Amino acid sequence: MTDTTPARLLKLLSLLQTPREWPGGELAERLDVTPRTIRRDIDRLRELGYPVEASRGSAGGYRLVAGAALPPLVLDDEEAVAIAVGLRAGAGHAIEGVDEASVRALAKLEQVLPARLRHRVSSLQNATVPLARGDGSTIDPRTLTTLASAATGQERLRFAYRSGDGTETRRQVEPYRLVSTGRRWYLVAYDLLREDWRTFRVDRVSEPFATGARFTPRPLPGESGGADGGGAEDAARYFARSMAGRQPELRLDVWFAAPAEFVVARLPPTLGVPEPVPGPDGENPSGENSGNGCRLRSSCTDSLEWVALRLALVDCEFTVQGPPELVEHLERLGARLTRAAGAPR
């Protein structure tokens, strides 16, 4: 191969990874070579293990076939920056459905990005104003990637931590796993100074620093394995037990005047899944005729304020049968909103 051949092959591979069929003439024009050179380069990619298929005819061309043995993905500069910015935006705001796997992917990508591309990603991120979530739980994606990398690499961490009452402390931990609840990120870790397991809200973590000191993962309380044996599931179970012990459990009983699929699409999965059940004689429990609806019976440890807000955001009529404290909160909230709507203009 000439000195330019490896670079050309990488660019050809990047084009072929776009899910379409590429005519040989178009590839030759893109790479500024002859169709004969394209055919030779395709043969070289096949020798390297890339499954490139060719089709004959005037509409024929080349395409890369997906498979279990597909070699590593190749991205050009713009694609790498776009993916990194997208992952940062999603991870930093704990969007529902963006979980620990996305953070691990972001950590790996940023680790291999050239310095010039890391600078472009940071510049784009710093120039973007995010839409505020309203609950103060936005996170610096660099904090997430530092925590994820330390947990994956089994490396001890130091960071500053602000508790719920505002107390500032310094922590040194052995990170186990990150857990996403959809609204927030938490770090499950063994606190070396307190000699016990802790869960930390990541939006309260600052100045994270990987010390370089390696450790052997400890088994979580009540679990038999370490980080290599069912670690993610163990961390999720431990986190659920930990949270259940901190906040009172709300036993929800809510009737929605809408089909179950409508409510499921608008309700966070952490609140449970409603079942299609019509009210008595096609009415909801409040006596209003609304046809078929659905009923949510589940438990959660979220705050009354957040649960009330999420129920209202479903955007349909609903009736809360329990718990009593949620009913009372909704009554106070409704009265407040009514006063606000009737205020002098």
Image: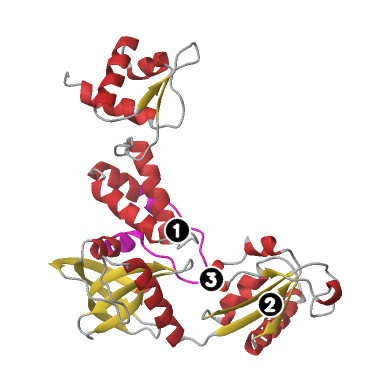
140 inside magenta stretch:
yes
- Is 71 situated left or right of 29 in this image? left
Residue shown at 73%/67% (left/top)? Answer: 316
* Mark 2 surroundings: few (<14), some (14-19) or many (≥20) residues within 10 A: some
Q: Amino acid at mark 1?
A: Val
Residue 324 at x, y percent in the picture:
66, 89
Please give the residue where the numbered disc 1 appears in the rendered image: 98
Q: Is residue 53 left or right of residue 258?
A: left
Instruction: Quickly name the residue at label 3.
Output: 270
Q: Position of residue 33 (x, y in %)?
A: 31, 13
Residue 254: mark: 2
The earlier-in-sequence mark between 1 and 2 is 1
Question: Would residue 286 be counted in the magenta stretch?
Answer: no
Q: Nearer the viewer, mark 1 or mark 2?
A: 2
Residue 222, numbered circle: none
Q: Is residue 20 left or right of residue 313?
A: left
State whether residue 203 is above or below residue 87: below
Q: Residues within 10 Å of mark 1 (few under 14, many from 20)?
A: some
Measure how far apart labels 1 and 2 are at the Cα level. 27 Å
The stretch of residues the image draws in magenta is 123-146
- Earlier in the chain: of badge 1 and badge 3, it is 1
Mark 1 lies on a secondary structure that is loop
Q: Amino acid at mark 2?
A: Val
